[in-house]
Structure formats: structure tokens, C-alpha cells
Amino acid sequence: MASSDPNEHSGRRQRQKEKFLRNGFDVFEQHEILEMLLYYAIPRRDTNPLAHRLLNRYKTFGGVCDAPCDELENDFGLSKNAVVLLKMQPQLARVYIDSKQNNSFYIDEDTIGDMFLSKFIGRDNEAVAMILGDAKGRIIFSDIIAQGSLNATEMPLRKMVDLAIRHNAKTAYIAHNHPSGMLVPSGRDLDTTMTVYDTLFSIGVRLVDHYIITDNGYLSIRQKGLADHIFTH
């Protein structure tokens, strides 16, 4: 029997928002992401059943955003505001990615560390970032690609390869943070660097450097000469 508590839906919304602020969408199912987005167009109704119905027909979040406007309005009773909100998502994603992948932005090894440093501000847990360059030395991808422990078995190698192939990359830089504040690479870090180097080399992409990041600064493994056996082999 459904609950009659008038605060039930507002309580769930607040919990979902707090969950998002703590973890981002990494821990959300697609229906939860859609449910939460619809909060901002449907302020006083439980959007969870609607999210499930939309996904049952259109299968994915992207499929819902790409669905015909008349179907969203007539078949699902969405308001114009809700339809506009959904239709904005692919466009916002495009604007966001385009703004980060400015083709006039060339790789400058003197500033790569600072670029990585900015990606880890306020992060308490370990994460992995990657920058990819094209044949002309332009940055074509720059983002956090994983969160969690960094070692040879848990490093997101497949994602690195997929991104490199998708963007037709020629060079790559990676970074991960040490929340402990120790600005020194461990033996595990060096083993991981070798694994990433060999994996990317196998698809024609050169790993140029691996950075260690802390709240107080960063360290370039290559520039410090800590892995000459990797970067020169």
C-alpha cells in the first residue's frame, strides 16, 4: 500500500540531492538520474514511476532526451518545461565538451601539472585524470576518468584505450592523487605507469608523463627522472 505521508517525496528528493553532491552520478542508476532531472520541471509529483515508464520505452537516458516532443507530451503528459529540460541535455553536453576541447589550445608541458592540479581540488578520494593530445599537439580530451584505488589491476585501462581510439589521440598524460599528501610515487605507481605505457603503446599512443597530485602540489614522474626505464624504452 502506498504511503500517504505528504513529506515522502520531498524527503526522497532531498536524499537524492545529497547523494548526488556526495558522489556525483557514478552511483546512480539511469532511472534515478532521469527522476532527479525531472524534479526541476515537476516540482510536486513523484517522478520515479515516470522515469521508469520513459526508460521502458526509450531504453536509455539518451534515448529519452532524443524522443519526439509530441510523444513526450501526448503519451507521457510532460509539460513544455519538462520537454525543454530534456531536450537541453544533449545541447548542454555538446557546449560543455566543446568548451573544454578548444582546438586552439595546445599542450604546454610547463602547464600540464597545473591543469591536472585543478581537477583534484576538493577531492578526498583517489581519482584518475587523463589528457589526450592529437598529432598537432592540441588537447582533444581532458577529464577525470575514474575514481578509486590506482594499481595495475584496477586502473581503467580499457577506458583509456577507448578514449584514445575515439579521439584519435597520439599522446597521453595521466595523473592520480595521493589524498595522504605524500608527494612521492610508490613502487605500485611505477608498476602502473609501465602497464599504462605498454597498453597505450600497443595502439600507437605515447604516454608522455604520469603526475602525482596532492593538495599542496604535484610531481612529474618523468621530469623527476624516476621512471627513465619506462619513458625511454
Image (tube, rainbow, N blue to C red):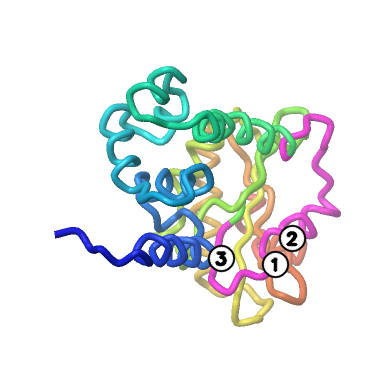
Span highlighted in magenta in the image? 100-128
Q: Position of residue 112 (x, y in %)?
A: 78, 53
Crowd rating for badge 1 (residues with CA inside 10 Å; few <14, some 14–19, many 20+): few
Q: Is residue 114 magenta?
A: yes
Q: Nearer the viewer, mark 1 or mark 3?
A: 1
* Secondary structure of residue under mark 3: helix
Looking at the image, residue 37 sits to the left or right of residue 175; the answer is: left
Q: Residue at x 50, y 35 (%)?
A: 82
Name the residue beneath numbered marker 2. Answer: 118
Q: Tell me if label 2 and label 3 are in contact, CB under 8 Å.
A: no
Disc ID at residue 40:
none
Q: Amino acid at mark 1?
A: Ile
Q: Residue at x 39, y 54 (%)?
A: 28
166, 5: nearer the viewer: 5
Q: Amino acid at mark 2?
A: Ser
Disc ID at residue 190:
3
Q: Tell me if label 2 and label 1 are in contact, CB under 8 Å.
A: yes
Disc ID at residue 121:
1
Q: Position of residue 188 (x, y in %)?
A: 50, 70
| Mark count | 3
Q: Amino acid at mark 3?
A: Leu
Crowd rating for badge 3 (residues with CA inside 10 Å; few <14, some 14–19, many 20+): some
